[in-house]
Image (tube, rainbow, N blue to C red):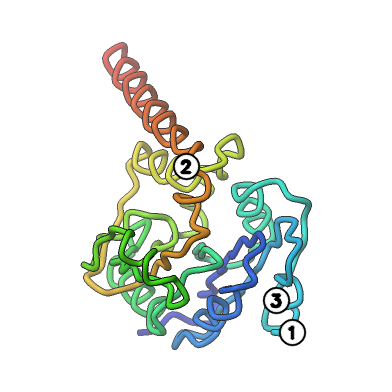
Amino acid sequence: MKMGNKTQVSVIIPVYNGERYLAETIESVLTQTYRSLEVIVVNDGSTDKSARIVRSFGSLIRYYYQQNLGTAAALNRGVSLACGNYFTFLDADDLWPEDRIRLQLVAFNAHPNVDIVSGHVKQFLSPELAENMKKNIRFSTELIPGQVIPAMLIKRKVFFRVGLFETEWEVGAEMSWYLRAMETGLRVMILPDLVLLRRIHESNKGITKRHFITQRAQILKASLDRRRRMKLDEHRT
């Protein structure tokens, strides 16, 4: 596989009070078999030890702080700073298998017309969870096709064709970006390989921000409305 020195991947990690898992998440990026990575951590106004943890990695990480503006704003800040030919995004509590980026770049090299390369996702219960909580959490242990932003490697020019993350969504900005990407007709390849380990713990947004889940329904409706308008415009032309 010949990629050359210009194939740099920008890894953007937003964090808000993520001290518990952040070091492990960063380590899973720094131990990738593919080494030409630019790792950007945007601290979205954390009040815990997140900043200290990031700084402990020294020059291996590009670190930036902003006041608490939300995940979408932190992702956008990371994008504005990124220099790579490819973008990928990682939550501050999830993990990568060590060969993830190499596999995705091999796929891009073999299929240059593809816009986004994803893979499969596996969920896991965080080890510190109490046994009674583990019993009450229902989730699939099977590999799931990675139709989520953190599983994807995205060409830089393709990302900007879709646009930045929408900051009006407190929950679901990544989902909204993906729907907009599909409306644009981007070509997505999903590898059979595992590319993302999603941690289930008591601070997941799906648990702590249930009152914002209605935003997901609003995001889906907005996508359907856009698709209807596109069809109407096609008929008119």
Residue at 42% in and 39% down: 180
- Residue annotated with mark 2: 210
Are there few (<14), some (14-19), or many (20+) residues within 10 Å of tag 1? Answer: few
* Contact (Cβ within 8 Å) of mark 3 with mark 2: no
Reply above or below: 159 against 43.
above
Front one among 26 and 161:
26
C-alpha gap between disc 3 and disc 2: 29 Å
Q: In this view, does 52 lie to the left or right of 12?
A: right
C-alpha gap between disc 1 and disc 2: 36 Å
Q: In which quarter of the image is residue 195?
A: bottom left
- Residue annotated with mark 1: 58
Residue at 44% in and 88% down: 33
* Contact (Cβ within 8 Å) of mark 1 with mark 2: no
Front of the two marks 3 and 2: 2
Judging from the image, what secondary structure is the residue with disc 2 in? helix
* Contact (Cβ within 8 Å) of mark 1 with mark 3: no
- Residue annotated with mark 3: 54
